[in-house]
Amino acid sequence: MVFKPANYSIKRSTGSKGFAMGRLFIKLTIIMTLALLLFLPVNSFVKQSRSYNINDDIVAFKENPHPVDIINLGASHSMYGYYFKPTGMSHLDLALPAQSIQYDFKLLKEYGKYLKSDGVVIMSISQMTFVSFEDQSVGKYYEILDRSEIEPFRLLDYYSYLYAPATNSESFLSALSGKWKNVKWQSHQSWANDGKNYVERKSAHVEEQYQKAVAENSIEENLKQLEEILDYCEEQGYQVVLTIEPVHRTYQEHFDEETMDRLVFQHLNTLETDVPFLNYMNDPRFADHKKYFHDSDHLNSDGRKKYSWIVYEELKKLGFF
């Protein structure tokens, strides 16, 4: 009889602990369910955004490849610069935003085999060509390049980018920025203050990258990579031209002849090549016409159609096609 109260106490304590664990499990289940219910629409929002699907044309081409007349490489200037369909030319746009010249080469080696025997490679040159670094935002290449070509490649990043991109803060913020691009502060609108605010921010970014490139000796590495691309085109029998796309006059005011010589031409002039160079940067047919631009240095739909016709006609004069 002496021990019964003790046994009862132990049983009651065990029962209380089990009850508490059960309540904790229920709470955790509710929290996880709510988190999942919140995450699913956010993840869907990111997966449907333009920034996440920026490579969709290349993905579609990979699934249904065909011979092409023109391939263009480069970053955003090139990506928004060309539309050759009205000319009757088949065209593969391999340019992507903030694309380094290293990935230009990787994409050319992957898709150059689809270029027709008399086709042309357009290698776009911009203010960032020689100062940009190896692209760290590699998610956009997961579906269009072999894993061995992607650096750095991490399996966890690969699966999270493809199936749960909302877990990546950069992907989420890019999607959000694209959704609310028309709700920016007035001073951050593309043409605020006649586009000068945008160009000042862009100029400061380019200058920062240039100083970093000088310190890390990456300019010489990028120049060497361009030489390798040109040599590769010659080896493969590809016809190739170098281009600079048109920009608005507000952009030209910050990236004048002296600045462009420091960022681009002094390096470009060291190349020993007879590859044609089509420089439309200060072309008066575009410089004073906002109607052709999305912002000071990116052509819009009307601008790229007009520009592509001009390039097409120039290529024909050079004896291509």
Image (spheres, grey):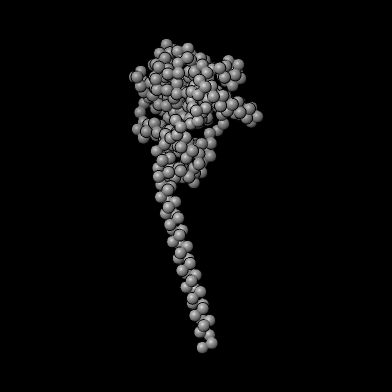
Q: Position of residue 145 (x, y in %)?
A: 45, 36
Q: Residue at x 41, y 40 (%)?
A: 45
Seen from this angle, which residue lies furthest front? 186
- How far from the left and from the top, in percent, is residue 25? 45, 62
Q: Residue lying farthest bottom?
A: 1
Give the quadrant of residue 89.
top left
Give the percent coordinates (x, y) of residue 175: 45, 37
Q: Quadrant of the C terminus?
A: top left
Residue 152 in sight in this render:
yes
The reply to whether residue 105 is visible in this rendering is no
- Residue at the image point whose x is 51% and y is 81% from the top: 7
Q: Residue at x 45, y 34 (%)?
A: 180
* Number of numbered discs: 0
* Residue 134 locus on image (x, y percent): 55, 33
289 up-or-down from 91: above or below: above
From the viewer's side, name the closer residue of 138 and 36: 36
Looking at the picture, tell me which residue is in the foreground, 107 or 26.
Answer: 26
| Residue 178 vertical placement versus 224 (above, below) | below
**Quarter assignment of residue 82:** top left
Q: Nearer the viewer, residue 204 or 96?
A: 204
Q: Residue furthest right?
A: 215
